[in-house]
């Protein structure tokens, strides 16, 4: 069974920020805007062996005025380092609504006890340039990394975007990365309705309290 890592150190703060941001985004009508993230340049395996793909999933995502794009792939490396990179131009105006990002990938190190370091960065160039770096150093093998967050830009023109993922085997031995299609690295992925998110958060709190009582 695969272990799932959820960025425990800051997951509570991020979930609260996502819920609060989504509630305010739903309460305040976004200005009319429409922008396109160009996918014509594709995805590149900067280091390692394998392939990665870049595709548009839908013309509208979490921010309905912006398309939803995702990166997937399967890469291996014998020297302990993997990097994939995707980027492109963008055109049009964004409304200032929060732009969701999502990641779900599996890292395997065949050497027992060989940990690894991962760093993922989503970037958007607009009224201001924003980079959302996420990273952690793990001491276990065969780990699934999954999570979500938001990028917030003020209203205005968007001119470019990027996604960069780096994986390092701490023992410099072989390592593999699997980003399955359908999970992937997503930029402007859909988010649950605020009511659904609040319900999920409430359910998680009730379960936590129940476990404390029965412990």
Image (spheres, helix red, strand yellow):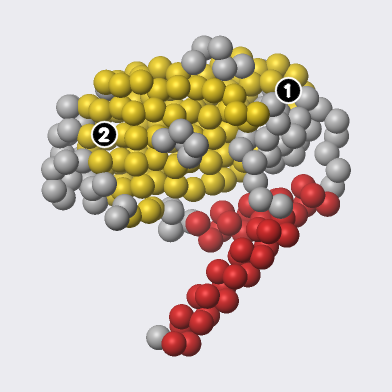
For mark 2, give the secondary structure.
strand
Which residue carries the number 1 mark? 35
Q: Residue at x 72, y 36 (%)?
A: 63
**On-image quarter of the N terminus:** bottom left
Q: Is residue 136 left or right of residue 197?
A: left
| Residue 156 can be seen in this image | no
**Where residue 125 appears, x then y in whole percent?**
63, 23
**Label 1 Cα neighbours within 10 Å, binned few <14 / some 14-19 / many ≥20:** many
The quadrant holding residue 58 is: top right
Q: Position of residue 5 (x, y in %)?
A: 38, 53
Q: Is residue 55 above or below residue 100?
A: above
Write the residue at 30% across / 27% down: 75
* Residue 179 vertical placement versus 202 (above, below): above
What distance separates the C-alpha of mark 2 from that of mark 1? 35 Å
Along the line of sight, which residue is nearer the eye, 39 or 98? 39
Relative depth, front residue between 92 and 54: 54
């Amino acid at each position: 069974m695969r272990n799932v890592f959820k960025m425990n150190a800051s997951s509570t703060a991020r979930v609260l920020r996502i819920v609060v941001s989504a509630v305010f985004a739903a309460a305040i009508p976004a200005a009319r805007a429409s922008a396109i993230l160009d996918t014509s340049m594709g995805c590149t395996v900067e280091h390692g062996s394998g392939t990665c793909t870049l595709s548009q999933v839908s013309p509208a995502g979490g921010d309905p005025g912006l398309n939803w794009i995702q990166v997937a792939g399967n890469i291996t490396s014998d020297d302990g380092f993997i990097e994939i990179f995707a980027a492109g131009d963008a055109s049009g105006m964004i409304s200032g609504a929060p732009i969701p990002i999502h990641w779900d990938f599996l890292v395997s190190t065949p050497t027992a006890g060989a940990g690894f370091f991962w760093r993922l960065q989503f970037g958007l160039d607009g009224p201001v340039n924003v980079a959302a770096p996420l990273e952690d150093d793990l001491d276990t093998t065969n780990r699934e990394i999954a999570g979500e967050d938001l990028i917030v830009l003020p209203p205005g023109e968007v001119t470019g975007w990027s996604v960069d993922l780096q994986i390092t085997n701490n023992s410099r031995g072989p390592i593999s990365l699997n980003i399955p299609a359908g999970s992937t690295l997503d930029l402007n992925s859909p988010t649950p309705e605020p009511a659904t998110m609040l319900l999920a958060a409430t359910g998680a709190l009730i379960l936590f309290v129940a476990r404390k009582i029965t412990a």
